[in-house]
Image: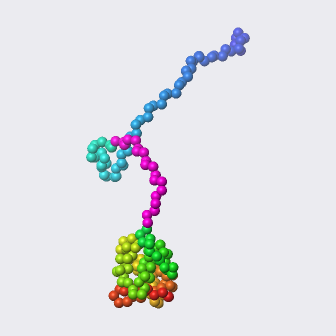
Amino acid sequence: MNAEGNAPAVEQAPKVETQTVEPKPAKPAKPAKAKVAKKAKGKPNKAKAATGKAKKAKGPAKAKKPAKASKQPKPSKGAGIAVPNNSPFRATSSYGKLWSVLFDHRDKGIRKEELVKEGIRIVGKPQRNILFDVSVVISPSKDGSAHRSANKAANSYWVERIGDGLLKLHLR
């Protein structure tokens, strides 16, 4: 209490007018900048080096074409080749198609070069790849040895080599 007997006066802070702050309007969006390819270390940027300026951004993307309703599969080459039931290879494989050519010539035999030409025509592979397939198909011998891709097939046939590259198929 003070000397007059009154309670001490509480000093009040001066009143300050408050203002309501409205949010600032958003800044307009900046136009997209063109992407400039990153330059490799030690090499100048080709886009800037040629013109001195960066490339401009492309316009709006073009609309995509609608997808086709249905796509028909292409007919496979050699689809009309009939592979015998006793073929040790799958009918749709290149081994099976080459084996069917050997099977068709089992009586008189076929030269390796002719088998390769037929394989190229029927299977549709390049010559280099057909040569690999031919070597597997003609690998089974009379004693039972064969390429490892034709191990199971060697139980059902073997190929006899007669003279100048003539191949003759024998069923076991």
Q: Report the magenta stretch's main SS.
A: loop
Measuring from the top left, give residue 149's x and y in whole percent.
Answer: 47, 78
Residue at position x 44%, y 79% from top? Answer: 100
| Colour scheme of the rendered structure | rainbow
Residue at position x 48%, y 28% from top? Answer: 25
Image height of 148 relative to 35, above or below? below
Q: How many marks?
A: 0
Residue at the top extreme, as displayed = 4
Image quadrant where residue 109 sits: bottom left
Image quadrant where residue 35 sits: top left
Q: Nearer the viewer, residue 122 or 116?
A: 122
Q: Nearer the viewer, residue 25 or 125?
A: 125
* Residue 136 in sight in this render: no
Q: Quadrant of the N terminus?
A: top right
Q: Is residue 114 left or right of residue 142?
A: left
In magenta stretch: residue 140: no
* Residue 70 in sight in this render: yes
Q: Nearer the viewer, residue 37 or 149?
A: 149
Q: Nearer the viewer, residue 127 or 114?
A: 114
Residue at position x 51%, y 79% from top? Answer: 85
Residue at the left extreme, as displayed = 50
Image quadrant where residue 54 sits: top left
Measuring from the top left, give residue 170's x and y in whole percent.
Answer: 45, 87
Measuring from the top left, give residue 108's x and y in whole percent.
Answer: 39, 87
Q: Is residue 5 left or right of residue 144?
A: right
Residue at position x 27%, y 44% from top? Answer: 51
Measuring from the top left, give residue 123's x and y in whole percent.
Answer: 41, 72
Q: Is residue 144 left or right of residue 13?
A: left
Magenta stretch bounds? 56-75
